Amino acid sequence: MSTFTIKELTDAVGSGITPRMVRHYHQLGLMPQPVRSPANYRLYTDQDVQRLQRIVALKQQGFQLSHIHKLLEAEPEAEQATLMAQLQQQYQTIIRQITQLRQTATALEGLLGRDLPCQTMQAEVFSQLKLLEVETQTGVGGLEKLWCGLDAQVHAHPEAFQESLQRLLPDLSTRSEIEVDLLSKLVLACGDVSLVPFVKLGNRAIAAGRDALKSGCPIVTDIPAVTAAFDQTRLAHLSCAIKTLIDNPHITGAAEAEQEFWRHQGWRERLEHIVDGSVLVIGYAPSVLLAVCENMANQTLRPALVIGMPIGFSHAPAAKRQLMRSQVPFITIEGALGGGLLAATALNSLTESLIAKPDCHCYLAT
């Protein structure tokens, strides 16, 4: 049986694992205590390598160390119900922590996101915040008064969104101008700057999408609600015909779209007739994106770009992972986040990069 020193163990696992981290995992009970050599060195086995690889993989998926410990120690069936209850409880704890962080972010956005006309009052708020006594109810009232004074400035002018974004967005200096515009528009569509790290583009998505749009490619969506959010004028000017896969006007949300797609085989059959080089925009039904990925893998569907942003808590993340593993250009948002407005916003950003907004759209009327 092969044995490894702690340095050889971390080298075998990789992923940035250090001996110090392994010793920490011993203290937490995540890794069993190893046997010792005559010289008192820790000696690890192939089983230890496999266990550490599992820990690293679960950690990379977002599980906390306490979750990982329970997952690795749980019995396959007998403890499953208990484990699920514990994980659900820990999930609710994390949601409360996210809520607290969201409140902190909102407060910071209220200060950092102010545009130039608000900066005089902003400076006053900064100076008073340093002196504020918040241990008493009077202090809390004083804080509310400060916010009211700052908010009073917003009635004098329209909000300058780009100025706010410059202070709030992460460093995007390595991104192209078109990609920065795309990310900015997605943030403004949902009001959440934390969306940016979850937006993923692959296989020259922007270039492939713009080339397809310039050639007048068809646009295929999952339900009418996505189509309704498109920049119809620019797409008409580009000669891009829009087709809706589930063209039932009564389907307006993710749950309805998902059930409708499974209820009627005809919707699946339509995927087989999508023209090569189309741009697919999926904003609601995760099973539509799963079927798209399956057809792409079978070479029966060859889109120029897939904008895949369905909503869901199990199927949607799985569908997006499949999309990101494909060789097809894609734009997606990791996890459960998404929706028709965000999917349409991504397409609209690409079309806007091709056609500047005219003074009047009436010239397209017939």
Image (cartoon, helix red, strand yellow):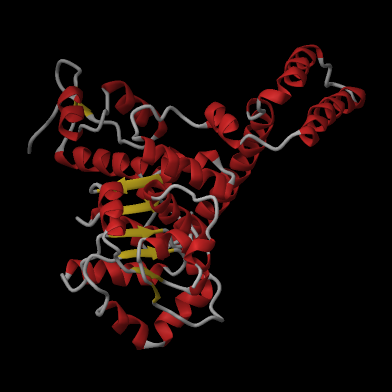
User: Is residue 79 visible from the viewing direction of this image?
Assistant: no
Above or below residue 320? Residue 293 is: below
Q: From the viewer's perspective, is residue 220 above or below residue 154?
A: below
Image check: 293 left or right of 24? left
Location of residue 280 with respect to 22 vertically, above or below: below
Residue 327 x %, y %: 19, 55
Quarter of the picture containing the N terminus is top left
| Residue shown at the point (73%, 15%) measured from the top left | 123
Q: What residue is rendered at 18% in x and 66% in y?
A: 297
Above or below for 85 versus 241: above
- Measured from the top left, where is residue 221 in percent x and y? 40, 69
* Residue 290 in view of the camera: yes
Q: Residue furthest right?
A: 138
Q: Quadrant of residue 127?
A: top right
Q: Residue most toward the left?
A: 1
**Residue 259 screen position, x and y as percent:** 47, 80
How many numbered marks have been drawn onto this rendered protein structure? 0
Residue 243 x, y percent position in the rendering: 39, 75
Could you tell me which residue is drawn at 31 percent across and 55 percent down? 321
Q: Quadrant of residue 162?
A: top right
Query: Which residue is more in the foreground, 273 or 338?
Result: 273
> Going by the image, does 89 lie left or right of 130?
left
The quarter holding residue 10 reads top left
